[in-house]
Image: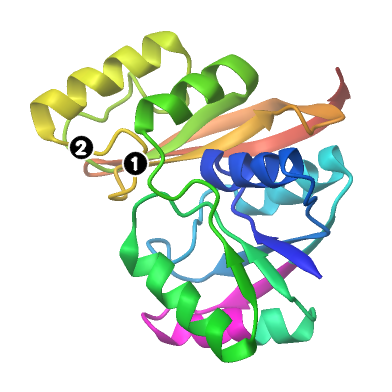
Amino acid sequence: MRAALYSGGKDSTLAVHKMSEQGKPIELLISSISDNEFSYMFHKPNIKYTELQAQAMGIKHVFFTTKGEKEKELADLENALVKNKVTELVTGAVASTYQRDRINVICKKLGIVHHAPLWNIEPLVELNELAEKFDVIVTRVAAEGFDETILGKRLDKKMIEKLLQLNKKYRTHMLFEGGEAESFVLDAPLFKKKIIIRKSHSEWQGSVGTFVIDDAILEGK
């Protein structure tokens, strides 16, 4: 079973896309529901709507739950991989050795092949491909310089210019790899339908802002 660890964000969705381009389509999407709002390993905002994304792509989808405790959450992932008989695992790892190394340990233990098609990708290369082919919004900001002008906004050419400016000023990672922000994909080349947000709101806790999707549906393209 070739599965993808799927958050609904730009990196995991692009990784699924890249594998399809290589003639290795994903058979299963695995998403985590974490009790920890700031998990070390797993994406949290709007995770329930990965179900809509899976439907849009026509790919089987499952959730697994975790308390999100550091290191212990890895055992929950391991159990999910065993339960779903995963033989190949695809992740959207870009530059985080923390995540990649831990995934590699689990995969080696279970005899699973780990694919990370975006590893060490040039940030502007990924961002330009996303802006051209995908419809992506920013669903969390948590770094200096990341504010309401970014939260809930689309990742387009204007946004890329903004991220370049923030990178130069604050040394933030343009692909958010340091946890500066998180994202959600509304449409992509593999989507047979697109996601329409019908209701949403923003929440702020200090400098951390979250764009919360309250209601969303699939609509024909």
- What residue would you read off at disc 2? 172
The residue positioned 61% from the left and 53% from the top of the image is 47
Callout 1: SS: loop
Callout 2: SS: loop
Residue 112 falls in which quadrant of the image? bottom right
| Quarter containing the N terminus | bottom right
Within 10 Å of the Cα at label 1, are there few (<14), some (14-19), or many (20+) other Cα atoms? some
Residue 194 relative to residue 127: left or right: right
Residue 68 lies within the magenta run = yes
Residue 68: in sight, yes or no?
no
The residue positioned 54% from the left and 38% from the top of the image is 10
Q: Position of residue 108 (x, y in %)?
A: 54, 84
Residue 142 falls in which quadrant of the image? top left
86 vs 155: above or below: below
Q: Position of residue 16 (x, y in %)?
A: 68, 46
Residue 143 relative to residue 48: left or right: left
For the residue pair 37 and 123, the one nearer the viewer reads as: 123
Residue 77 lies within the magenta run = yes
Q: Position of residue 59 (x, y in %)?
A: 85, 51
- What residue would you read off at disc 1? 176
Image mark count: 2
In the image, the segment drawn in magenta is 63-78
Q: Which numbered marker is on residue 96?
A: none
Residue 130 falls in which quadrant of the image? top right
For the residue pair 42 and 177, the one nearer the viewer reads as: 177
Amino acid tagged 1 = Phe
| Quarter containing the C terminus | top right
Within 10 Å of the Cα at label 2, are there few (<14), some (14-19), or many (20+) other Cα atoms? many
Marks 2 and 1 in Cβ contact (< 8 Å): yes
